[in-house]
Each structure stands twice: as C-alpha cells, then as structure tokens.
Image (spheres, rainbow, N blue to C red):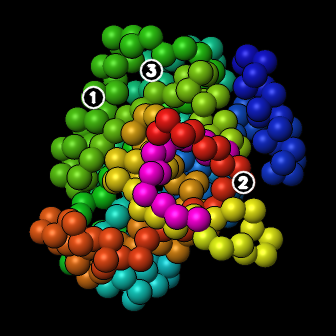
C-alpha cells in the first residue's frame, strides 16, 4: 500500500472513529466508503453496507440505492413507493477490496461469480446473514415489478492498491461476469469497474475536496445587501454552463452538491415529465416556468474576460 493511500485510510479510520485494527478490514471499509460515497453522500451507517466474513460470496459490501435513497430494509421500499408511486432509479453497488499490489484475475472472477450467484434463483454458494438480508431486500424490490419504471443497474467495483494495466486475463474475467449477469435479463445496465491505487486516491479526494469550477455568468444582476451575506447575484445560465456546476471532468454527476438539496432527483414523476416536455417543446420559456437553483459558495472570483 503506497504512503498516500495509507495516509488517506488512516485519516478516514480516525474521522469515522473505527476501532478495527486489522489493515485488510480497514481497507475494505475505506474502499466501500470511497465507492459508495460517489453514489450517496448523505449520512448513513457504514456497517449497513458491509457484509460479514465467511459465506460472503466473495463480496465485501453491498449498497442498494433506490430513488436516491439508501435502502436497508423492505419497509423503506414501501415508503418510497408510497411517496413516489414508483421505483424509477434502482442501483445495486457491489464492492470487493484487496490490499494486494496487483489485480488477480482469479479473485476478480470469484467476485463476478459471487455477484451472479447472489442474484440466482437457485444459489449454490454458502450465504452469511449479511448476504441473506441484502438478498431479501432485492428480492422484495423485484416482487414490486409493476412499480419499477426501469430495470435496475448493477455495478461491480474491484478495488486494489495496484495499477490497472488492462491485463487480458482480468479483462476477460470482467467480460465473463458482465455477460453472465446480462443473461439474467433483469438489468438495464451492468458495469464491472476496476479501481486501482490512483483511482482510489481520486475517489477519496472527491469525498473531502470542495467543488471548484469556472462558468460564464454574463446574464446576472447584483442583489441588494443582505445581512451576513457578502455578495449575491440573480441571473440565468446557458445549460452547458450549468452542467459545469453539477458534472465533474469525467462526466459524472457531482452527487455531493445535492447533499442538502431537496431538489435532487425525485424519481420518474409528473413534475419531471412536465419539465422534460417544456425543454423539448418550448425551451425558450423554461426560465419562466421554473424558478431556478440556489448555489451557495464560500468564495467566488470574477473574470471580466468571460
């Protein structure tokens, strides 16, 4: 394990007040946090996604995110249906982490086979309590098929401290796992994602770094003085400029910006359909029908050349 990852992991263990002393277990917790935080940034109990030792199907952690909510019980699925009247955005996230300095195609194959067995109607692997609990939740989701607007997405993350070099054997195992899962015909998207040391560093930095970006904000006015507010503006942006605020350099949604925002994705509902229709038919009137987004910044710099 390189010194940077070790330092990041030590900081994480301290900040989360984790008492685990075994380094490999610490790395599993750290990796699960780094991955899941890219999908879900609200407060949750890390132990709710960790799978216990033995009978774990080669899986370290499983996160179930439905309509933007971290789900840990069947009752929460019922609550989501009651509020949204549907299950429209379902993501299953599996993580396997190894402290080894390289990618082991055998271990990657075992991970893929374990995830496939997890979804199998006739499972062959021994299952511990954590696997059973997660499987019961997912089976309950599938039992609500009439309420599902889009088949779930399935993401497999294999994390090591090594360097990803597109090894043919590893890539082959990933393709086999993806093909096996695709054959189940229950997913809208399947991705097997290798995370190496460099990428793991980036994932953790995303969890602690502030968002900094540059936009062209020509169409604005200054608002009158407001107590305890240094400066404020009212205006409108070209959509491509707005995207710079919510999408990172890799084209992924910056989920952290929605941490305290009740206007994060609320599912496939009537309001979203109306907004979509406005964009498709009368985009020039969109600003009149929708009252915008509030952005709070700690610092702002002006460049008159924009």
In percent of width and height, residue 12 lies at 78, 42
- Measure the C-alpha gap from mark 1 to mark 2: 47 Å
Q: Vertically, is 111 above or below 33? A: above
Q: Vertically, is 199 above or below 153? A: above
Left or right of 294: which side holds 44?
Answer: right
Outermost residue on the left side: it is 281
Magenta stretch holds residue 190: no
The one nearer the camera, 173 or 289, is: 289
- Could you tell which of marks 1 and 3 lies nearer the N-terminus? 3
- Secondary structure of the residue carrying tag 3 is helix
What predominant SS class does the magenta segment belong to? loop
In percent of width and height, residue 11 lies at 83, 38
Image quarter where the N terminus lies is: top right
Residue pictured at 57% horizontal, 39% vertical: 303
Q: Which residue is mark 3?
A: 106
- Secondary structure of the residue carrying tag 2 is loop
Q: Vertically, is 117 above or below 263? A: above
- Is any atom of residue 90 visible in this view? yes
Q: Which residue is mark 1?
A: 176
**Highlighted magenta segment, given as a residue range:** 210-222
Residue pictured at 70% horizontal, 34% vertical: 27
Q: Which residue is mark 2?
A: 298
Left or right of 158: which side holds 242?
Answer: left
């Amino acid at each position: 394990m390189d010194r940077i990852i070790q330092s990041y992991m030590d900081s994480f263990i301290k900040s989360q007040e984790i008492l685990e002393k075994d380094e490999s277990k610490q790395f599993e917790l750290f990796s699960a946090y780094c991955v899941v935080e890219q999908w879900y940034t609200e407060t949750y109990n890390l132990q709710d996604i960790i799978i216990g030792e033995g009978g774990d199907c080669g899986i370290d952690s499983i996160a179930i995110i439905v309509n933007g909510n971290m789900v840990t019980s069947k009752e929460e699925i019922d609550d989501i249906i009651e509020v949204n009247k549907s299950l429209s955005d379902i993501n299953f996230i599996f993580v396997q982490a190894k402290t080894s300095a390289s990618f082991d195609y055998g271990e990657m194959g075992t991970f893929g086979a374990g995830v496939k067995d997890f979804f199998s109607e006739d499972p062959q692997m021994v299952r511990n309590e954590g696997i059973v609990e997660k499987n019961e939740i997912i089976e309950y989701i599938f039992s609500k098929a009439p309420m599902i607007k889009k088949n779930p997405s399935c993401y497999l993350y294999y994390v090591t401290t090594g360097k990803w070099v597109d090894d043919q054997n590893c890539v082959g195992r990933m393709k086999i796992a993806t093909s096996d899962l695709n054959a189940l015909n229950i997913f809208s998207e399947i991705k097997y994602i290798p995370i190496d040391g460099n990428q793991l560093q980036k994932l953790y930095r995303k969890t602690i770094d502030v968002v900094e970006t540059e936009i062209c904000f020509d169409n604005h006015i200054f608002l009158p003085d407001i107590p305890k507010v240094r400066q404020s503006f009212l205006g409108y942006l070209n959509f491509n400029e707005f995207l710079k605020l919510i999408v990172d350099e890799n084209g992924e949604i910056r989920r952290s910006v929605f941490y305290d925002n009740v206007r994060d994705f609320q599912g496939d509902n009537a309001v979203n359909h109306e907004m979509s229709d406005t964009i498709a038919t009368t985009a020039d009137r969109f600003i009149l029908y929708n009252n915008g987004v509030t952005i709070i910044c700690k610092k702002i710099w002006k460049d008159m050349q924009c």
